[in-house]
Image (cartoon, helix red, strand yellow):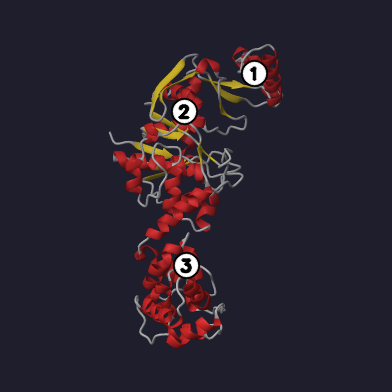
Amino acid sequence: MAPLVRFAPSPTGYLHIGNARPALLNLLYARAQGGRFLLRLDDTDRERSTAEFARAVAEDLAWLGIEPDLHARQSDRSAEHDAAAERLKALGRLYPCYETQEELERRRKRQLGRGLPPIYDRAALDLSADQRAALEAEGRRPHWRFKLDARTIAWDDLVRGPAHVDCASLSDPVLIRADGSYLYTLPSVVDDAAFGITHVIRGEDHVTNTGVQVQIFEALGAPVPVFGHHNLLTTADGAGLSKRLGHLSLRSLREAGYEPAAVRSLAVLTGSAESVRAVASLDELAGLVDLAHISRAPAKFDPQELDGLNARLVHALPFPEVEARLAALGVPPDRAEAFWAAVRANLGKVAEAGDWWRVVSGPVAPVIADPALIAAAAETLPPEPYGPETWKAWTTMLRERTGAKGRALFMPLRLALTGLEHGPDLAGLLPLIGRARAARRLAGETA
């Protein structure tokens, strides 16, 4: 059966590069296996989930090239979640608890002081109906815990291989808050089962959750998906990434002018057996990803490495892929292709082409570093039309006339024609600058 995978972010902030990793790993796994990809917004956090962040999730994924086959929102499925909760209550697996956070914290401290594990002691299961009624009469409203079987849950992890969680070492997890809202766990299981999710690929911070979720799947009589837990991306200094802190958000990377293929390549290949390199297409990237070869160590995301990847991708971009962006930078359509060929090897980002178009079109304040050489250059400046061989013919003539060669010849010309000490090959820029503008710059005029 072809896999159905899902990416299930909470719309409580802007996605960051660490979120891109599971999104892409799921998409690429589905592509490689001929499967489908579900985008599900886990928006049960009513206070922090916003329509703005939900729109941003869709925009950021589209920028990465992720086009979901299916869409869902957990907030549309509350009836299904309620039905599952009632079923678990009827089975005796979901039970009410009335302790406050302060009471639970005091209890945990006492257990630690006695050398006991700080897990919930299931005291609520010993309450009589009268005791529960008395607590509710005080104004207390219960939160609801899932009663775990004290057994080990084992599975064959797509990334980690044989894995297990000893549920006897865990507290019964809270599935429903006192205000009636759901935590992540129950809606996630219910919706995975309802949509027929076959493979759950996510960060290794969810390994312990898997033991709990498998028991909920089983209690509800639902098929248990295949799980894979990959290593997490961190900052270059090893710190975790956070939506709240805005670490390397996809939005900020996009606004900074990075290519989505560069972000995809680094997000996926960092911390894998594959060398990190620029991979232009999703299909090619899908062919490189092997979940079983992802490292167990944290994967450090280095923005400087992103700069290098981005530059290599930009240097290889064919003109049709940047034509619209060059037009937005003010490059005339009839000159855009020649301009792109001349400047792309000097760019780290496509947007930097705008700076070089301003050098071409002016105004530029020339720097006359060698007046005698520049005077000779003005006298020998060839007539138009200019083409790819014009620069070589002109500098050959100038070298023969003045004896200047190498840097002594080319640097004064570059300074006069562009006002800069570095830049694209002047053989490509000179035809774009044109004879009239070049002559004015050689004469020391701003043009």
Pointers 3 and 1 in contact (C-beta within 8 Å): no
Q: Which mark is residue 132?
A: 1
Residue 164 pos. (x, y %)? 45, 20
Question: At 65% from the left edge and 27% from the top edge, which residue is drawn?
Answer: 141
Q: Disc 3 or disc 1, which is closer to the eye? A: 3
Label 1: element kind: helix
Which kind of residue does numbered mark 1 sit on? Arg
Query: Mark 2–mark 1 contact, CB under 8 Å?
Result: no
Q: Position of residue 216 (x, y in %)?
A: 46, 24
Which mark is drawn over residue 84?
2
Q: Quadrant of the N terminus?
A: top left
Q: Position of residue 278 (x, y in %)?
A: 40, 50
| Front-lying residue, 310 or 177 | 310
Evaluate whether residue 177 shows in this view.
yes
Q: Amino acid at mark 2?
A: Ala
> Considering the numbered disc 2 on the image, is that residue within a helix, a strand or a loop?
helix
First in sequence: mark 2 vs mark 3: 2
Alpha carbon of mark 3 to alpha carbon of mark 1: how far? 70 Å
- Mark 3 lies on a secondary structure that is helix
Residue at 46% from the left image edge and 16% from the top image edge: 152
For disc 3, the marked residue is 353
Viewer-side residue, 153 vs 330: 330
Identify the amino acid type marked 3.
Answer: Ala
Bin the neighbour count of mark 2 within 10 Å (Cα to Cα): few under 14, some 14-19, many 20 and up: some
